[in-house]
């Protein structure tokens, strides 16, 4: 990948994550020891349940994020657009991959190994600061999206018609995906408008009593 392309990708990444005090050159330096790879359509970036020792940054193309529900059926959580971080939670907390990521068409990613991550995360200097602030920004976005979805799931404003148990399960699955770092939509309001919850008969009676009290 050319230097100009790396700078352009770094600038896009910085615009999306808004890390105060971080310059484009800092991100370029942060990525200096990383591998750049072009993936074909359908290529697996990571598999759910596997041990993770790499962080990925999607620079070009798109990535489908799939997760198994409690019945073992694979569901699509979202399709990521660049620039996007993938797989960073495994490096942060040592967990296994929480979802499967597949390339849609031809995609280009940056691959940061555990060795480079460990060096950069402890580095005193602009590249290390860039990585730490990039991760903090990404984790903040995860919490905001996840909390917003949880708030919507727990709200008193239930839909008039009961949602099915499967729809409720899918909403919870998508919320878990948001908390694990899989961005569901750039437009949060559109994302939340799709979430539905199950309203039981007891819920209806309780809310009817509240309205009449």
Image (tube, rainbow, N blue to C red):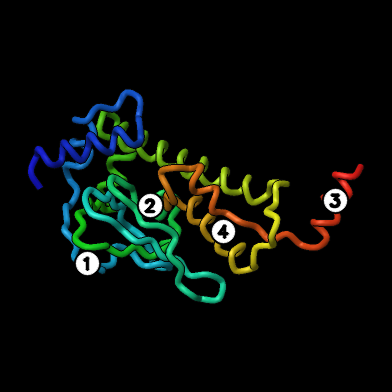
Residue at the front extreme, as displayed: 160
Q: Distance between the residues labelled 4 and 1?
A: 28 Å
CB of mark 1 within 8 Å of CB of mark 3?
no
> What residue sits right under mark 4 in the picture?
171
Q: Is residue 196 left or right of residue 14?
A: right
Q: Distance between the residues labelled 1 and 3?
A: 52 Å
**Residue 41 disc label:** 1
Q: 49 and 178: which one is in front?
A: 178
Q: Which comes sooner in the sequence, label 1 or label 2?
A: 1
Label 2: which secondary element: helix
Q: Distance between the residues labelled 1 and 2?
A: 26 Å
Name the residue: 43% across, 68% down: 49
Q: Residue 17: percent from the left, percent from the top?
A: 35, 35
Q: Which comes sooner in the sequence, label 3 or label 2?
A: 2
Q: How far apart are marks 3 and 2 (CA)?
A: 48 Å
Q: Residue 29: percent from the left, percent from the top?
A: 19, 36
Label 3: which secondary element: helix
Residue 96 visible to the viewer: no
Name the residue: 31% across, 64% down: 102
Q: 186 and 68: which one is in front?
A: 186
Above or below, 23 relative to 169: above
Q: Which comes sooner in the sequence, label 4 or label 1?
A: 1
Q: Residue 21: percent from the left, percent from the top?
A: 32, 23
Label 1: which secondary element: loop
Q: Which of marks 1 and 3 is in front?
A: 3
> What residue sits right under mark 2 in the picture?
91
């Amino acid at each position: 990948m050319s230097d100009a392309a790396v700078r352009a990708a770094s600038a896009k990444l910085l615009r999306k994550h808004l890390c105060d005090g971080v310059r484009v050159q800092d991100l370029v330096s942060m990525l200096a020891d990383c591998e750049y790879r072009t993936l074909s359509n359908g290529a697996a970036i990571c598999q759910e349940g596997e041990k993770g020792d790499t962080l990925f940054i999607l620079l070009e193309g798109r990535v489908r994020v799939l997760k198994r529900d409690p019945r073992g059926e694979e569901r699509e959580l979202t399709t990521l657009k660049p620039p996007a971080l993938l797989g960073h939670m495994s490096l942060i907390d040592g967990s296994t991959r929480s979802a499967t990521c597949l390339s849609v068409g031809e995609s280009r990613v940056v691959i940061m190994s555990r060795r480079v991550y460990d060096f950069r995360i402890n580095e005193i200097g602009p590249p290390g600061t860039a990585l730490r602030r990039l991760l903090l920004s990404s984790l903040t976005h995860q919490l905001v999206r996840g909390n917003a979805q949880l708030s919507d799931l727990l709200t008193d404003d239930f839909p008039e018609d009961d949602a099915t148990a499967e729809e409720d399960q899918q909403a919870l699955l998508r919320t878990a995906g948001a908390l694990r770092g899989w961005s569901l939509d750039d437009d949060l309001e559109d994302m939340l408008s799709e979430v539905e919850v199950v309203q039981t008969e007891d819920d209806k009676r309780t809310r009817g009593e509240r309205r009449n009290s």
